[in-house]
Image: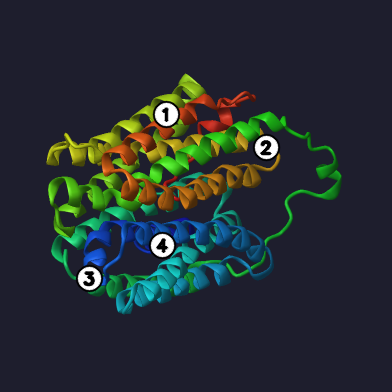
Amino acid sequence: MSRALKMGATGFGLIAVCYGFARFAFGLFLPQIRTDLALSDTYAGTIAGGAFLAYVIAIMISARTCERMGAKAVAVISGLTAAAGMLGIAISPSPTWLAMFVVLAGVSTGLASPPMALAVSQGVDRAQQNATNTVINAGTSGGVVISGLVALGMSERWREVFVLFAGSALAAALAAWRWLPSGSAESVTSPRKAAHVRTPARGTLWQLIGASFLAGVSSTALWSFGGEMAARRLHWSTHGISLLWIAIGAAGVSGAAAGILVTRLGINRVHRGFLAILATGTSMAGLSFTTPLATVLGGALFGSAYVMLTGIYLVWGTSALPHRPASGLMVGFLTLAIGQTAGAPLFAQLMQRTSLQTATIAFSCLAVSAGLFQFNGHLKASKTAAAPATMKS
């Protein structure tokens, strides 16, 4: 097995565990968890928002820690943190303990991404780095699909499922310890070169912040409450809700075409189009007219649009900061996560004080409103065409 293949498989597994299991599976099993632990809508939203906030803090810490400790150490820590968080979820006796462990699981998600980016840059030939990153980025979609398939067979036994997920996280941590490089990051920009880096137009970044924040807020309608929508509208159990999760994850693979579409049609046109698709998917799953087919199709539209939008924000950020692409990526992804942190409790409050119908319509409108922000910088086709899409944030 080649070094690139080993790195890709290791990263795929780690991202699948930390994003697909430790972060997004909570929404899949939320209806059953609510019943067993007597969670209110507001408390469930607060827990989901706490997990997103943990991601925001952890990804900033992880990026700096990788420079000092190296990719292997931080990746192993992320896997162990995911295992501890999900094992804690499995044994939580009360809502308070559940909240603590869901947040801990969310920390693992933020820790996982920076070490994999560093590991690929250190351990894979330049010609294979884009392909390896694409495999790793697909981990979230894979994790969401796997969690849905597991739920089909263990729909009511969420505690046992999270024990299994914790075991897979330990396996991912072991693989990271075995296959990832241990060296710390080396500076790629000398002080002399840094002095000649042109400061980008601030307006482009502020537009990105506005767009990704609103998209993040709106996305929590399905990420955190998709299972609740299906349970209330269609009286689905976790077994049925798993079909929605499988549709979201499987359709997310199409987001790999983000770079090609942006190059051919432009960021703004593709951005507005997929925001509309995100809003449509959310509405199809949450409005009163929904049917089983409409809910699954809505989930597929949402999954495809979400991954496509994260790819667009990746291109947007790296084009705004061409000499600091990692920083450009972080601007969009962190703001997306901040929006999700605010969105989860906001949706829960709106749903509790008004109705699920009103909350769904409001968040669908927020998705469309993100299109008011536009990319106004210079896009280089040679770079954006190769930019991988991701479902991570």
Residue type at mark 2 is Leu
Q: Name the residue type under label 3.
A: Asp
Q: Is residue 196 above or below residue 147?
A: above
Where does label 3 land, which residue? 36
Amino acid tagged 4: Ile
Q: Earlier in the sequence, mark 2 or mark 4?
A: 4
Mark drawn on residue 368: 1
- Front-lying residue, 95 or 330: 95
Q: Secondary structure at mark 4?
A: helix
Quadrant placement of the N terminus: bottom left
Going 62% across and 67% down the picture, which residue do you hit? 70
Check disc 2 and report the residue beneath it.
321
Q: Nearer the viewer, mark 2 or mark 1?
A: 1
* First-in-chain label (2 vs 1): 2
Q: Are marks 2 and 3 in contact (CB under 8 Å)?
A: no
Q: In the rendered structure, which disc, 4 or 3, sits on the residue that comes first in sequence?
A: 3
Q: Which mark is residue 47?
A: 4
Circle 1 packing at 10 Å, graded few (<14), some (14-19), many (20+), is: many
Label 2, label 4: how far apart the Cα atoms are: 34 Å
**Mark in the foreground, 2 or 4:** 4
Q: Residue at x 23, y 69 (%)?
A: 158
- Residue neighbourhood size for the residue with mark 4, other residues' Cα within 10 Å, grouped as few (<14), some (14–19), many (≥20): many
